[in-house]
Image: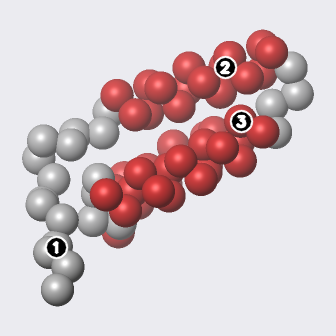
Amino acid sequence: MVDELERHLPRMLKAQDAPPGFWTWFAGEAASIGSNAHSKADWLHVRDRLSAMVECVDVDNKPAPKPVD
């Protein structure tokens, strides 16, 4: 599941007008993956992988959110 999330990361950054929409999507996916960890070791592995993905998100070079009318 973590591999699948990582594969979708670039597409979702573009599709969700990242970062605002991206974070909602990512948090939901991360929560689902974390809840399926079967042991503490699994959970720690998932946490480390998710943390590494988050570190790669470049929030400074993303377009500003569209204003709400």
Spatial distance from mark 1 to mark 3, Cα to Cα? 31 Å
Number of residues whose C-alpha sits closer than 10 Å to that of mark 3, classed few (under 14), some (14–19) or many (20 or more): some
Looking at the picture, how far across and down is residue 13, in whole percent? 34, 56
Looking at the rendering, which quadrant does residue 33 occupy?
top right
Spatial distance from mark 2 to mark 1, Cα to Cα? 36 Å
Q: SS at mark 2? A: helix
For residue 15, the mark is: none
Looking at the picture, how far across and down is residue 59, in whole percent? 21, 43
Q: Which amino acid type is shown beneath numbered disc 2? A: His
- Regarding residue 52, the answer to whether it shows in the image is yes
Q: Give the vertical position of 26 relative to 63 (above or below).
A: above
Looking at the rendered image, the disc whose residue lies closer to the viewer, 2 or 3, is 3
Q: Are marks 1 and 3 in contact (CB under 8 Å)?
A: no
Q: Which amino acid type is shown beneath numbered disc 1? A: Lys
For label 3, the residue is 34
Left or right: residue 62 versus residue 39 is: left
For label 2, the residue is 45
Q: Give the vertical position of 68 relative to 12 (above or below).
A: below
Q: SS at mark 3? A: helix
Q: Which amino acid type is shown beneath numbered disc 3? A: Gly
Q: Give the vertical position of 69 relative to 67 (above or below).
A: below
Q: Residue furthest bottom?
A: 69
Looking at the picture, how far across and down is residue 43, in whole percent? 73, 23
Q: SS at mark 1? A: loop
Looking at the rendering, which quadrant does residue 68 occupy?
bottom left
Which image quarter holds the N terminus? Answer: top right
State the residue at coordinates (78%, 39%).
35
Looking at the picture, how far across and down is residue 11, in whole percent? 39, 60
Looking at the rendered image, the disc whose residue lies closer to the viewer, 2 or 1, is 1
Q: Residue furthest right?
A: 38
Looking at the rendered image, the disc whose residue lies closer to the viewer, 1 or 3, is 1
For label 1, the residue is 66
